[in-house]
Amino acid sequence: MKDKLVYVLILGLSTLLGAIGQLLFKLGFVDHGFLFMFLSLGIMSYLASSVFYFYVLGRTKLSWTYGFQGLSYLFVSIFAYLILNESIVPLRWMGIVLIVIGTAIIGLS
């Protein structure tokens, strides 16, 4: 059980880093003066995300591990709302809540 909790935390970090990578890509395309910097940081964030993901994938079942990628919808939406000032309609938030519930169910399995 302790190993599973560690894997869940690592997958959460992996997913968060992937979402940060998406945010950095978007920031690069919004502010072309810093395009190279943001794209480079985004790629590094994605690389770190992949390293953590591969670590867990090598030790757990694919069907369990991959389910956690659904959390990226939550993280990206929060970043888009807070940092990019994007409006997110209630129906989309409802979908995100369902995805998070599904991810929790996968994590418990």
Image (cartoon, grey):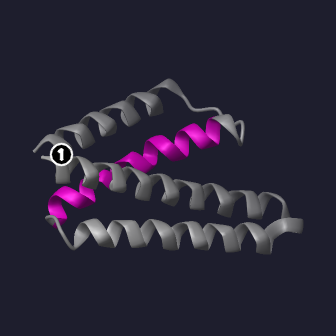
The local crowd at label 1, few if under 14, some if 14 to 19, many if 20 or more residues have their Cα within 10 Å, is: some
Q: Which residue: 18% across, 66% down?
A: 62
Q: Quick check: 56 above or below 23?
A: below
Q: Is residue 48 magenta?
A: no
Q: Amino acid at mark 1?
A: Ile
Is 10 or 75 nearer to us in this picture? 10
Is 78 or 91 nearer to us in this picture? 78
Q: Quick check: 51 above or below 74?
A: below
Farthest front residue? 2
Residue 89 in the image: state x and y as whole percent. Answer: 54, 28
Tell me the SS state at disc 1. helix
Residue 101 in the image: state x and y as whole percent. Answer: 26, 33
Q: Which residue: 38% across, 46% down?
A: 71
Farthest top residue? 90
Farthest right residue? 33
Magenta span: predominant SS is helix
Q: Is residue 46 left or right of residue 98?
A: right
Report the quarter where the C terminus lies: top left
Q: Which residue is mark 1?
A: 106
Q: Which residue: 63% across, 55% down?
A: 23
Q: Which residue: 75% across, 64% down?
A: 28
Residue 75 in the image: state x and y as whole percent. Answer: 50, 44
Mark count: 1
Query: Which residues make up the magenta segment?
Result: 62-81
Q: Is residue 67 magenta?
A: yes
Residue 41 in the image: state x and y as whole percent. Answer: 67, 68
Q: Quick check: 19 above or below 81?
A: below
